Amino acid sequence: MSAVPASLRRLVTERAGGRCEYCLMPQAASAFEHEPDHVIPVQHGGKTEANNLALACLRCNRRKGPNIGSLDPETGALVSFFNPRKQKWQEHFHLEGAMIQPLTPEGRVTTKILQLNDVQRVVERERLIVLELYP
């Protein structure tokens, strides 16, 4: 992985408002520091620059890994992941309580591969909602 300079790290964090750009988990509620994620990984030609970096929590970043997409569970078509630099979260996902509901093929593959609605993550979001820390 390409090192991300501190100034670029700060820009990515500030631009995201301190929240994971995939699951909306606030940095303040996370045990681990959120990380700049290469939306298009370096091994696929992605650059370490602002327009290719998104703030990601440890869970989302590790599950995404070097992948750029997956097979849509509804259609079987190969679909790219949600891209926070080019797409709006609200157009691809909808919150129903603590559940993140996908609205598009990109939303479906991102939800599936990043496991946005695994039980532990939903329970954690429910607690944060009660504390008014999520979203």
Image (cartoon, rainbow, N blue to C red):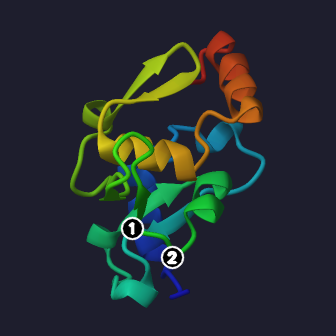
- Mark 2 residue crowding within 10 angstroms, few (<14) / some (14–19) / many (20+): few
Q: CA–CA distance between discs 2 and 1?
A: 18 Å
Considering only order in the chain, which callout, 1 or 2, is on the residue closer to the N terminus?
2
Circle number at residue 10: none
Quarter holding residue 51: bottom left
Quarter holding residue 77: bottom left
Q: Which residue is mark 2?
A: 6
Work out whether residue 25 or residue 7 is closer to the camera in this orientation and state it.
25
- Which of discs 2 and 1 lies nearer the camera? The answer is 1
**Residue 130: percent from left, percent from top:** 67, 10
Q: Is residue 8 visible from the viewing direction of this image? A: yes
Instruction: Indicate the amino acid at tag 2.
Output: Ala
The residue under the point 61% across, 33% down is 117
Quarter holding residue 1: bottom right
Q: Which residue is mark 1?
A: 39
Q: Is residue 22 visible from the viewing direction of this image? A: no
**Residue 26: percent from left, percent from top:** 58, 38
Instruction: Indicate the amino acid at tag 1.
Output: Val
Position of residue 68 relative to residue 72, above or below, is below
Position of residue 76 relative to residue 120, above or below, is below
Task: Find numbered disc 2 in the image and state the secondary structure of the residue it sits on.
Answer: helix
